[in-house]
């Protein structure tokens, strides 16, 4: 065993271990002939096999130190992330790294061996530490030529790190790991994503994957603060110190971008590397706007816009004469950076004013403050600020659907008073202020609300409903976008789960069910478990709709899901929904579920074709041979009709309470008969799993009867002596002759349990205080015997006779 656990330490031992597990695991074999074929490129790697392989590789054995283990396996895993061995092994390596190693606190926290050998090799080449150059100096004894640029990270190493990081992020849904890995790299990723388009190789190897990683992070952590960070670092070129960076990204050759040591560069290159130029503003502003619109919601965009506007107003009022302004953070902001913010504000107002107007309350409040403070001082210094405020006011009140009634009366009065003063002042803005005053005065008459007649009877949506609608729309966008990677789709499902848990009224239940049914069929195996969880959450509020939807897909009478794995996923979801319903699983719904499950279990080996194909084949057969149609006497019978359930009266079905009782006598009897038939007719090694399920079904049925007897409930049916003998005879035969070890073991256990249950059923039940039936009297109450073990146990004194045992015929 110790020699086997050390196999991953060998050269290429990680890949050998993975291929061995994938080749022998039953779930990974598509056909019997593939059982001995190593599962390599394009293999059918299942989640179960990957879990076992990940456990073998990710955790070091007790005889090996973590440093030694991860130092040996990390180069192999990182090499698999490169993709040269096929996409399946890329997913396997990303699963082992993301969940097995970096996903655990003992091996994935910063400072641990797993983080050192697997995370840092991907992070350090993209964002070296401040003392990275000194570490290289200590490791090498080379003479540094200060006349040449000193390369710290070469182009190929930088491209390799970004490629591996992208493979790790997009190969499995782990939003937590994505945030941990990408959060320290925001500015370097932005510098690479906004790099000048010089050579196609640079864009393909660096710019495109960097932009993709940046979009993933902004979707997982949508925040206006991140946009402000990028705006304030629009010209970021590298390093930690903005005034004099330690290192910078630089195009050392036409087709290469490398990280060079800025401290040893000639002149003031390092000091000026982080300063943005006017050309950078014109080039990077459209890219930033594209990034914002593709990742953030309208509310986040509006919040970022307002924050930028406040900062610009503060700088504009404090910098009369063009001097340097010191911000709240204490950072010096040069005039070019102020120009960048102003350029971005102007571009946002021109490009998507409707997005900025999603928060009219905050914009109008800010406009009222600006106009109120500037109405009395209309000199040239404030004209630019007033002009921006008037533009914002025009943007808000001209948006379709604007209503004065929804504006705070105090804010509206302050705006109208300020516009009146500005319209009478002898300035260039007086005419604009007067036009806006008239527009605001007659706004409702110009564009009346089409629902004004019924507005008195309807209530405006609450703030929670507005936020829930935004969250729901964002989640649907994350899930349905074709280019959404698994972490983003997982985050979208998490948002919907939060809305379901909060019982939000904005949810479209039929639409969500259709969406989940499409995702569970096509999604990765890491995603469908979360989808099943969503089904169980929906079942708390809409059990009938959820169960009906799942049952239709699991039974699949129209054969819309030809893959058995897809139907099994629906079956697993249906099982968890039924378990979640508990005692409420009764009545017509329980009968329908039972009938459909019996139909699925009884149609094995002769799965019917779709109705359309049956009709098409029937017409073709009729044209080819009319005698065949005459022999059949009409249309060929459909063998796919489900087995009919019990024929209990509707009034009796309504009286059924829960679980077995809710299914009804007909469904239960048909289920037991079906299990007996499976045990008798379904032989063969490949059908052992069916026989195991049949045995366990009988055991579950007996347990349900015993629990009902203990609780004093009447189920309306039982397990008669004749039926018991038939089942016991079949189980004893299976326990002696079956070729499957698990079937034999299960059959023997069930036979023993049935024998014990037959004895226990002879004991009468006594009512306890809570109304439940408790077994009382012990063996003294067995029919035909008069034995009192309690009195015998107490009869150990000299005045009590000892019990006497007699043998009788």
Image (tube, rainbow, N blue to C red):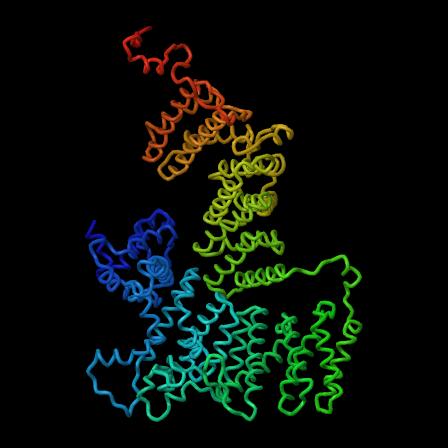
Image position, residue 386 (x, y; %):
65, 85
Which quadrant would residue 464 be assigned to in this image? Answer: bottom right
Visible residue check, residue 726: yes
Tell me: residue 275, above or below residue 710. Answer: below
- Depth order, front residue of 434/660: 434
- Asked if residue 805 can be seen in this view, the reply is no
Q: Residue visible at 54% across and 69% down? A: 296
Quarter of the image for residue 726 reads top left
| x and y percentages locating residue 345 in the rendered image | 58, 81
Residue 635 horizontal side relative to residue 423, left or right: left
Q: Residue at x 55, y 35 (%)?
A: 595
The structure residue drawn at horizontal position 73% and vertical position 81%, both measured from the top left corner, is: 419
Q: Relative to the observer, which residue lies in front, 158 or 302?
A: 302
Query: Is 274 on the left or on the right of 455, as rendered?
Result: left
In the picture as drawn, the residue positioned furthest to the top comes out as 809
Above or below for 326 versus 28: below
Image coordinates of residue 663 in percent, x first then y, are: 55, 33
Q: Is residue 561 above or below residue 453?
A: above
Quadrant position of the C terminus in the picture? top left
**Exactly how many numbered labels are in the figure?**
0
Task: Name the one closer to the observer, 808 or 410.
Answer: 410
Residue 278 in the image, given as x and y percentages of width and height: 50, 89
């Amino acid at each position: 065993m110790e020699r086997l656990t050390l196999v991953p330490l060998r050269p290429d031992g990680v890949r050998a271990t993975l291929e061995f597990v994938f080749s022998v695991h039953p779930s990974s074999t598509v056909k019997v002939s593939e059982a001995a074929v190593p599962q390599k490129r394009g293999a059918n790697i299942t989640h179960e096999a990957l879990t076992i392989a990940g456990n073998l590789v990710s955790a070091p054995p007790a005889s090996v130190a973590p440093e030694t283990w991860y130092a040996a396996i990390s180069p192999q895993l990182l090499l698999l992330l490169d993709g040269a061995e096929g996409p399946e092994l890329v997913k396997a390596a990303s699963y082992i790294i993301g969940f097995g190693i970096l996903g655990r606190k003992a091996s994935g926290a910063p400072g641990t061996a797993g983080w050192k050998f697997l995370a840092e090799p991907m992070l350090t080449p993209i964002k070296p530490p401040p003392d990275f150059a000194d570490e290289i100096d200590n490791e090498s004894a080379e003479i540094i030529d200060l006349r040449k640029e000193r390369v710290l990270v070469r182009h190929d190493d930088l491209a390799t790190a970004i490629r591996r990081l992208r493979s790790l992020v997009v190969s499995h849904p782990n939003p937590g790991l994505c945030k941990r890995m990408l959060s320290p790299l925001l500015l370097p990723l932005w510098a690479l994503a906004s790099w000048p388009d010089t050579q196609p190789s640079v864009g393909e190897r660096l710019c495109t994957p960097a932009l993709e990683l940046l979009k993933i992070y902004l979707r997982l952590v949508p925040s206006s603060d991140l946009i402000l960070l990028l705006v304030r670092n629009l010209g970021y070129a590298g390093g930690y110190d903005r005034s004099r960076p330690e290192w910078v990204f630089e195009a050392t050759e036409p087709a290469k971008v490398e990280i060079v040591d800025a401290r040893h560069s000639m002149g003031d290159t390092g000091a000026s590397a982080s300063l943005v130029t006017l050309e950078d503003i014109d080039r990077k502003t459209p890219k930033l706007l594209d990034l914002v619109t593709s990742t953030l919601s309208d509310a986040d965009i509006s919040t970022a816009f307002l924050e930028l506007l406040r900062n610009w107003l503060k700088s504009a009022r404090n910098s009369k004469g063009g001097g340097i302004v010191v911000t709240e953070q204490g950072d010096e902001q040069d005039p070019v950076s102020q120009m960048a913010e102003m350029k971005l504000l102007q571009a946002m107002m021109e490009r998507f004013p409707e997005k900025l107007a999603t928060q009219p309350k905050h914009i109008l409040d800010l406009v009222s403050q600006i106009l109120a403070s500037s109405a009395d001082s209309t000199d040239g210094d404030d004209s630019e600020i007033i002009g921006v405020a008037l533009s914002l006011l025009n943007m808000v009140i001209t948006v379709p659907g604007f209503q004065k009634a929804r504006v705070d009366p105090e804010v509206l009065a302050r705006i109208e008073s300020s516009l009146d003063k500005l319209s009478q002042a002898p300035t260039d803005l007086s005419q604009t202020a007067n036009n806006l005053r008239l527009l605001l005065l007659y706004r409702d008459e110009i564009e009346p609300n089409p629902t004004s007649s019924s507005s008195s009877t309807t209530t405006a949506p609450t703030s929670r409903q507005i936020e829930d609608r935004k969250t729901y729309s964002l989640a649907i966008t994350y899930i349905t976008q074709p280019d959404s990677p698994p972490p983003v789709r997982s985050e979208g499902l998490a948002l919907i789960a939060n809305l379901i848990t909060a019982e939000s009224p904005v949810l479209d239940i039929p639409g969500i069910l259709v969406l989940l049914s499409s995702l569970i069929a096509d999604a990765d195996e890491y995603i469908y478990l979360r989808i099943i969880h969503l089904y169980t959450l929906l079942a708390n509020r809409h059990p009938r709709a959820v169960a009906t939807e799942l049952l239709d897909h699991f039974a699949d009478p129209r054969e819309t899901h030809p893959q058995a794995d897809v139907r099994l996923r629906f079956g697993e979801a249906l099982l968890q929904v039924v378990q979640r319903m508990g005692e409420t699983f009764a009545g017509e719904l329980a009968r329908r579920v039972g009938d459909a499950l019996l139909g699925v279990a009884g149609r094995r080996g002769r799965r019917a074709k779709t109705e359309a194909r049956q009709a098409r084949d029937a017409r073709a057969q009729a044209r080819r041979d009319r005698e065949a149609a005459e022999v059949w006497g009409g249309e060929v019978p459909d063998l796919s009709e489900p087995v009919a359930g019990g024929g209990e009266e509707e009034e009796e079905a309504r009286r059924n309470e829960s679980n077995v009782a809710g299914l009804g006598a007909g469904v239960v009897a048909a289920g037991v008969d079906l299990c007996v038939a499976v045990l008798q007719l379904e032989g063969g090694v490949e059908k052992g799993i069916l026989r195991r399920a049949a045995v366990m079904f009988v055991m579950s049925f007996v347990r349900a009867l015993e629990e009902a007897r203990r609780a004093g409930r009447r189920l309306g049916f039982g397990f008669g002596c004749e039926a018991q003998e038939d089942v016991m005879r079949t189980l004893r035969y299976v326990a002696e002759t079956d070729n499957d070890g698990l079937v034999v073991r299960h059959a023997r256990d069930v036979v023993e349990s049935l024998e014990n249950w037959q004895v226990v059923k002879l004991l009468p039940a006594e009512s306890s205080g809570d109304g439940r039936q408790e077994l009382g009297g012990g063996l003294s109450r067995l029919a035909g015997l008069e034995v009192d073990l309690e009195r015998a146990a107490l009869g150990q004194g000299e005045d009590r006779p000892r019990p006497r045992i007699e043998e009788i015929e």
